[in-house]
Image: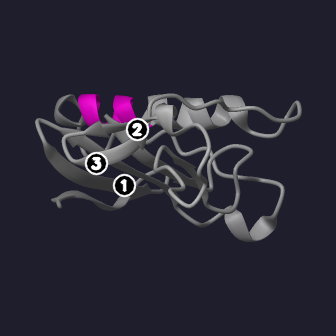
Amino acid sequence: MLIEFKVFNYRSIGEEQTFSLIPNLAYDEHNENIIDFHGHSVLNAAAIYGNNGSGKSNLLSAMALLDKLVHLSARTSSTTPLPYDPFLLKKEFSDKPTKFEIIFVTEGNRYKYGIEFLAKKVIRSGYIKR
């Protein structure tokens, strides 16, 4: 179950953006939309909405790309170019790495995984069981 996804410097997303299914427990309405998943309170649904060109599709594209990077990593060589597609509207982002981070729960265990990469180099990747 997805808990949180973060993206930085990818397509139309410059600054770090977070998609979170962690409920705001101080908000006392619609508690029926909060479920307990292996001891973690999470929202059972979420909506992504905004203006045209505000990054909705690129958020979903970033999630799909992280999935692709993880699944194809064992079948690619260290010289395979990475799908680096940085935010180009501000010059300072052109040489910064793209970063993806995900927090999820599976089989009752909570994990955090992240990757930072440029076109030709993975700077950091790994997961932490929490």
Along the horizontal axis of the image, is 87 left or right of 82? right
Residue 51: horizontal and vertical position, in percent?
Answer: 88, 34
Name the amino acid type tagged 3.
His
Q: Earlier in the sequence, mark 1 or mark 2?
A: 2
Q: How many marks?
A: 3
Q: CA distance from mark 1 to mark 2?
A: 8 Å
40 lies above or below 31: below
Predominant secondary structure in magenta? helix
Q: Is residue 71 magenta?
A: yes
Residue, x 73% and y 71% (percent of image)? 92
- Which dot marks residue 66? 2
Asked if residue 31 lies left or right of residue 122, the reply is: right
Circles 1, 3 touching at the beta carbon (< 8 Å): no
Region in magenta:
66-72
Nearer the camera: disc 2 or disc 3: 3
**Mark 1 or mark 3, whichever is nearer to me:** 3
Q: Are marks 1 and 2 in contact (CB under 8 Å)?
A: yes
Q: Quadrant of the C terminus?
A: bottom left
Residue 55 position in % (x across, y down): 74, 39
Instruction: Please state which amino acid type lies under the numbered disc 1.
Output: Ile
Question: What's the distance in space between the residues labelled 1 and 3, CA to CA?
Answer: 24 Å
Q: Residue at x 22, y 51 (%)?
A: 111
Residue 117 vs 54, above or below: the answer is below
| Disc 3: CA contacts within 10 A as few (<14), some (14-19) or many (>=20) | some
- The residue located at (57%, 30%) in the rendering is 61
Label of residue 115 in the image: 1
The amino acid pointed to by label 2 is Leu
The residue indicated by pointer 3 is 40
- Label 2: few (<14), some (14–19) or many (≥20) C-alpha neighbours in 10 Å: some
Dividing the image into 4 quarters, which one contains the N terminus? top left
Residue 68 is a magenta residue: yes
